[in-house]
Amino acid sequence: MDQVKAYLRILMKHHFWLLVGAAAIFGLVCWWMGANSLAADTKKNMGKVKDSWEALERVVKGKPANQSFADQVGTLNNDLKKVVMAEWQKCYDQQQELFHWPEVVADIAKLKPSEPIDPDMRRRYKVLVFNKDPEKGGRALQKLYERADYKHFIEVAAPAVAAPEGAAAAARPMNPGDEAAPAATTPTETEEGLVIWDPAHRADLEHRYDMIHQRDPTTLNIRLAQEDLWVLEQLADVIRRSNEGATDVFAATVKRIDSLEVAQWAIAKSQSDRSKIMLAEAKDQSGGGNVTMGRGDATGEAGDPKGLNQEEMDKKLDDELLDGRYLNDQGQPLTVADSPPFAEFKLLFVRMKLVVDQRRISELLYNCITAPLPIELRLVRMDPPLVNPLGGGATGIASQTPAAGGFGNEGFAQASGPPGGAPAGMRLGRLGGSGGATGGSSYSSATSTSGGDATLEYGPFDVTVEICGVVQIYNAPDEEKLATGSATDVGKRLPGLPISPVKLPTARGAGGGSSTLPGMRGMGGGMNKAQ
């Protein structure tokens, strides 16, 4: 008994350390038991996951064991394909309502997009569509200008003015049966339209689509030229809608059109007009503004290699028209060798450079994105006001039209006036067509000497705006081509600007095969600044 008491005294003396040791042993035993149980459950569940994954792979890669499931998936896919095809057809039909062939070649509309155009019809298009003669030609570009309600002068006969008493007596017939001499009339000019369209740019367009003096165009040449015209018409309609309700140029949203461009010309102009951030090599590729959609003769000069037969030469020139015309899903120009990113539509780059009332720029952009041919905006760049609102004359370019020596002037005339003068909001800069700027005490002006072109007085809210975007040109619906484009992931499409340089289609006049037209220094010589 005494020994038990001795042990109890030792236990009571060291009970703390004994309890700590027992707790440690108990914890180790519990951890071991729990870890074994958790490992067993993990192994069991991992086996279930692996079995389920292998079963799913067999369904995806192999033939499903349940045929009814496969049939239902196929039905859903077919229903979805029908919905997509219906939307494709709807978009195509809506676009065809906007795109009409000129009346003089209306029979082309009866052909499928892939069918060749008869040579006689191609010659008819070449001679008539862009002909300015109202009795013979389609006046395609003149109608384009009118769609934008461009300002111009027309000659009209003034009403007869009463002759003085002596002259009236002399005009009376001497004999009862004679006719009286007609009253004298003096021709006069009247101004029509609302928006000034830069005459240099109009000349560029007329050079570009000059087919009358070129070799017979190919089917592709005609279809692309007409596609350009259709898109330009829609851009002109955007401007006209933006100016609805305006009775004079001062109330208009868009006051001046410096340029409307599509395809390679839009890409080249956007790259050359990005101030100091433009790469030199890209600028050199931009060429001049007067490159024509026509085709030269087989002279062996300037893009007509010797030794090519007619078919090979047509193929070469068609490739030049397509090279860089459309964009890929990354917003860069497609080469002839590239596969289209989308089988359903093509992406065409467009550019507008306008003088706009900056208070109404939002209306202009709204009309761009809600147009019947919607413009997916990529860039909106606004320059400083053309007129200093604090006085001191115009702050921007007063004239971008060519000097009297012809198109291709190397400099811009900048309107400037003496400091002070009229109070804020009253100083105006006047735009003309000659490029001569003069300063005055009340406003800065550039007097127009280009006959038939109107002039414009700028206000303090007028700015030059560059708008770049993309339009979708839908292809004819074809179920076999649905979702066969090279773009595998539409979600990775980039809404950027094309930065890859493009080469404009070669311009070769029928007279000598030269690649240089008036106002253009050649394909590698840089941009014509009269834009």
Image (cartoon, grey):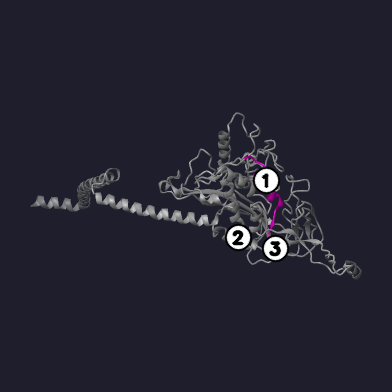
Residue 372: say if magenta: no
Q: Which residue is mark 1?
A: 207
Residue reaching furthest to the right: 166
Q: Residues within 10 Å of mark 1 (few under 14, many from 20)?
A: some
Residue displayed at 56% across by 48% down: 497
Q: Amino acid at mark 1?
A: His
Q: Mark 1 near mark 3, Cβ–Cβ under 8 Å? A: no
3D distance between C-alphas at marks 1 and 3: 28 Å
Residue extent of the magenta highlight? 193-215
> Would you say residue 468 is visible in this rendering?
no
Q: Position of residue 53 (x, y in %)?
A: 27, 46
> Would you say residue 41 is visible in this rendering?
yes
Vertical side of 461 occupied by 310: above or below: above
The disc at residue 2 is: none
**Considering depth in this image, is 389 or 223 the residue closer to the camera?**
223
Seen in the image, is 68 located left or right of residue 519?
left
Q: Which residue is mark 2?
A: 364
Q: Amino acid at mark 3?
A: Val
Q: Position of residue 247 (x, y in %)?
A: 68, 66
Residue displayed at 69% across by 52% down: 133
**Which structural element holds mark 1?**
helix
In the rendered image, which quarter is residue 302 located in?
A: top right
Q: Residues within 10 Å of mark 2 (few under 14, many from 20)?
A: many
3D distance between C-alphas at marks 3 and 2: 15 Å
The disc at residue 249 is: 3
Residue 205: say if magenta: yes
Q: Amino acid at mark 2?
A: Leu
Seen in the image, is 492 located left or right of residue 22?
right
Residue reaching furthest to the left: 1
Which is more N-terminal, label 1 or label 2?
1
Q: Position of residue 492 (x, y in %)?
A: 46, 48
